[in-house]
Amino acid sequence: MPSDVIRATGYRRQPGFIAAEHLGLFAAQGLEIDYEVTTHAPTHNAGMAVGRWDLTLSSADTMIARVTRDGTDYVLFMNVERGVDVKLVASDSIGSVGELRGKRLAGDPGDSNYDLHRRKIMRDHGLRDDDYEVEIVGATPQRYEALVAGKVVAAMLTPPHWQRAVERGFRVLDEAARHVPSYPVSSGWFLRPWAEAHRDLLTPFIRAQAQGSDWVLDAANRERALDLLAEEAELEGDEAERALERVIPHAAIDPAGLASVVELRAEMGLYDPPYDPVERFYDASYWAGATGLPAPEPYGVPRIGMSGSPKV
């Protein structure tokens, strides 16, 4: 019997998705996932807006940015990871974040994700956006290459690139998790009209993803899950362990995490009042229907301006 095809995209496959693929959980639901890795934020965002892919497993921040700034009719249906693993890495000639004043850093085009985390780190260290330069070079692999080539003195890097940079003598100055704790990262979202017309595909997709997430979190499967991360995501040792720690059970929607995204965007001047309840950005009926679990309690309007910054 032929499978239904879902065209999906994202910047990387996360643990629960990898498990769902390798265990045949998508196939067991009658699905074939045509997954395309994206490396360039504007290309990803433009493609999603015109339906190049059915859905994306990427940052909730990107979705909220495009809804609030562009008016694109996206809706989120699940969160699969919580907690960022991205570090501000610099040349060994830079001893502190403060020494980046007047220097050139690598950036990713856009107004979301790691660029916001970089801005948050810098502001918490007393540097405003105009206190340093940013050269737009692209996603983590491109930022890493720019750093190694000496085109910039610092960049936000994810695994395994920040480890590779450290091995080459570069220095970790700070990490985003200290400044944006419990931040939702890989999340499922799509154009609302497509979702409403394809609930029959979304239900089995979410069910398989939730099963994959729960499988990697089961202690009985831990060694095999770590092996899969080494094989498919080039993550080993502590980084693989941390990747598993970020997986959200059941791929459940995280209203409090989404509120933290909205709060950061408002702090960075990228979301203007009046502020909407977080429920504007997600529809829990898809997830609840797929898992048989109750929808999360509504969060309401985020507490803009009430979150504190870490001491540095």
Image (spheres, rainbow, N blue to C red):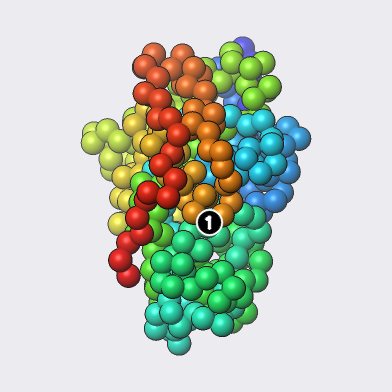
Q: Quadrant of residue 149?
A: bottom right
Vertical side of 89 occupied by 2: above or below: above
What residue do we see at 28% from left, 43% from top? 223
- The residue at the point 64 percent across, 25 percent down is 192
Q: Nearer the viewer, residue 114 or 270?
A: 270
Q: Pick whichever, 116 or 146, lies toward us.
A: 116
In the picture shown, does residue 211 fall above or below 1? below
Residue 37: x and y in percent read 61, 46
Q: Name the spot of residue 27 as percent of width and height, x first.
A: 52, 22
Helix, strand, or loop for circle 1? loop
Locate residue 27 relative to residue 47 in the image: left or right.
left
User: In the current view of this chain or complex, which residue is farthest to the left?
Assistant: 219
Q: Is residue 233 above or below residue 251?
A: below
The residue that appears at 41% across and 71% down in the rendered structure is 125
Residue 189 seen in render: yes
Dot 1 crowding, Cα within 10 Å, few <14, some 14–19, many 20+? some
Residue of label 1: 268
Residue 72 locus on image (x, y percent): 69, 35
Residue placed farthest to the front in the image?
A: 274
Three-letter amino acid code at disc 1? Met
Task: Return the residue found at the far bottom.
Answer: 93
Task: Work out which quarter of the rendered image holds the N terminus and state it.
Answer: top right
Among the 4 quarters of the image, the one containing residue 135:
bottom right
| Of 301 and 242, the residue lying toward us | 301
